[in-house]
Image (cartoon, rainbow, N blue to C red):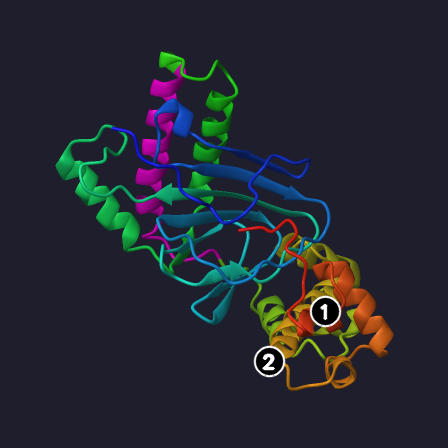
Amino acid sequence: MRRARIKLGFDYSDMPERKVVSLEADGIACVPAIGFDNFQRAWKVPEVHRHPECLEISLCLRGSLGFEFRGQTRTLLPGNVAVSGPDDPHRFSSYPKRLSKYWFLFRIPTGRFPLLRLPSGEKRWLVQKLMALSGRMFNGERLLPCFQRIFRIYDSGPVKSLERSLLLRSAVTDLLLRIVECSKSPPRQESNARLKSILREMEEHPERDYRIDELAERAGMSPSNLVKRFKKLTGLPPHAFCVQQRIAKATEMLRQGSRSIASIADELGFASSRHFATSFKQATGVVPKLWKAGKAKKGKATP
């Protein structure tokens, strides 16, 4: 039984910093897109969006991501998984440099449409468990080998090869079952409570000035160790992370449209409106004036 292809809403083409494949040609219609992102530069933040027929499941490997779900934003740390449902407005509100993550879209089977050739009872059980994860974050460190295996199999043989198709179906089944199992584990957290407190403060008050020596004293670390731990946690040094949070907050303030660009720049701690405009364009690809006017170019976007 064939099923019409769905519109994914984004350009999911391969590119130097993103590998994307579809498993539909191998008879696995439940995975229209699976990808590995390894960004060496900051990417433009996408608009809030939905995937009407799919769950989106993302495993953060490196960097700190803002997971915006139904208007609320939480921080996705390395080793954690975030899940959004088919009708849930969501996006990742930050795409910092050196971000690395695996992700895939799980197309929800309906009616008699098969799921990995599973019996109907097993199909209903698995879909029910996966649908219940919408909006959840949990520890998914054990999922990394599953993603790696899928890409390894995909690259190992010709399309529509019986052996490759069987191996891929087995690997995807293993990934889905392990996601259900991992969902029982709480999200991974940074062990140093003082560093977590600093990170939370910078997310809530990015307009403040954060000196490395003062942060190191608060965390009980040397300045060099603080920077090292901070980069391991967020993918960025403290100042760059702070600027990232300022830009994220600025996008929301500009979207509201009631504040001038100069007042936003001043409130968020930028040295000048020009400094703000330069930093904003580097992060989003457009200047604040165009973002405020709703004229941001529909360029390459990320899920």
Secondary element at tag 2: helix
Q: Give the distance between the C-alpha atoms of the residues marked 1 and 2, in whole angstroms.
A: 13 Å
Pointer 1 residue: 290
Secondary element at tag 1: helix
Relative to 267, 199 lies left or right: left
Please report the residue visible at 50 percent of the width from the left and 31 percent of the height from the top: 148
Please report the residue visible at 69 percent of the width from the left and 48 percent of the height from the top: 98
In terms of sequence position, does the residue under pointer 1 or pointer 2 come before the other?
Answer: 2
Q: Amino acid at mark 2?
A: Gln
* Magenta segment: 164-188
Residue 193 lies within the magenta run: no
Question: Which residue is more in the foreground, 246 or 159?
Answer: 159
Pointer 2 residue: 256
Q: Amino acid at mark 1?
A: Leu
How far across and down, in percent of the image, does residue 302 sit?
58, 50
Relative to 96, 116 lies left or right: left
Judged by its main secondary structure, the magenta piece is helix
Q: Is residue 164 above or below residue 238?
A: above
Residue 169 lies within the magenta run: yes
Mark yes or no: residue 226 visible.
Answer: no
How far across and down, in percent of the image, does residue 47 sit?
56, 61
Please report the residue visible at 47 percent of the width from the left and 61 percent of the height from the top: 90
How crowded pointer 1 is (Cα within 10 Å; few <14, some 14-19, many 20+) is rated as few
How far across and down, in percent of the image, does residue 126 sit?
24, 42
Quarter where residue 89 is shown: bottom left
Mark yes or no: residue 242 visible.
Answer: yes
Relative to 20, 1 lies left or right: left
How crowded pointer 2 is (Cα within 10 Å; few <14, some 14-19, many 20+) is rated as few
Q: Which mark is residue 206?
A: none
Question: Which residue is more in the foreground, 225 or 230?
Answer: 230
Of circles 1 and 2, the one toward us is 1
How far across and down, in percent of the image, does residue 228 sit?
72, 54
